[in-house]
Image (spheres, rainbow, N blue to C red):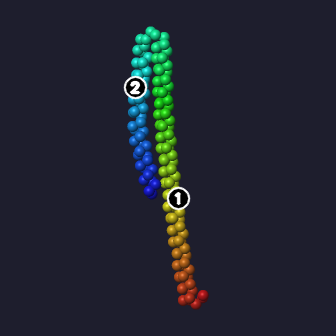
Amino acid sequence: MADGGKSGLGGATSAAIEAVAEPVKNEVKEIIKETVQSISGSSSSQDPQEEAKRKTEEEVKKRNIQAFLNNLAQQEQALKAQRAKETQEKAQTQQLESQQKQAKKIEQAQKSQERQNIDVANKQRATERKLGTG
């Protein structure tokens, strides 16, 4: 039961992280998009070396941005996988608990039947003794 509390807390934490991550991810994408557009549109340099340097820096920035977005997507996938695993573990735990309850009910029913059989046999012996046939 203590483990169930942990997974509940982990699930809540995962949900909170996902709730925060999605808007942040969207906002970052928009900021990056605007930044790249503003950098691309404000090219007023005439010097070929400066232009080449600017293009190189732009490419580096684009790669860094793409790497950041890729990392963010990987984290999102890991979070989804973690939540799926937690859900599966919870379902397995519930199934196991259900099976254990069912086994306990069957065991109790068998014990009750055994007691009834013993009671019937005792009554039958007592009756036979009274009648003198046993």
List the residue tagged with mark 1: 99
Residue 15: x and y in percent read: 42, 42
Residue 77: x and y in percent read: 50, 37
Q: Which circle marks residue 35 in the picture?
A: none
The residue closer to the viewer here, 76 or 67, is 67
> What amino acid is labelled 1 in the image?
Gln
How far apart in space, not on screen, are marks 1 and 2 (Cα)?
Answer: 53 Å
Residue at the (43%, 21%) spot, across then down: 36
As helix, strand or loop, the secondary structure at mark 1 comes to helix
Residue at the (49%, 54%) spot, across then down: 94
The residue closer to the viewer here, 131 or 65, is 65
Which quarter of the image is occupied by the N terminus? bottom left
Residue 101 against residue 20 in the figure, above or below? below
Please, which residue is most extreme toward the bottom here? 132
> What amino acid is labelled 2 in the image?
Ile
Q: Residues within 10 Å of mark 1 (few under 14, many from 20)?
A: few
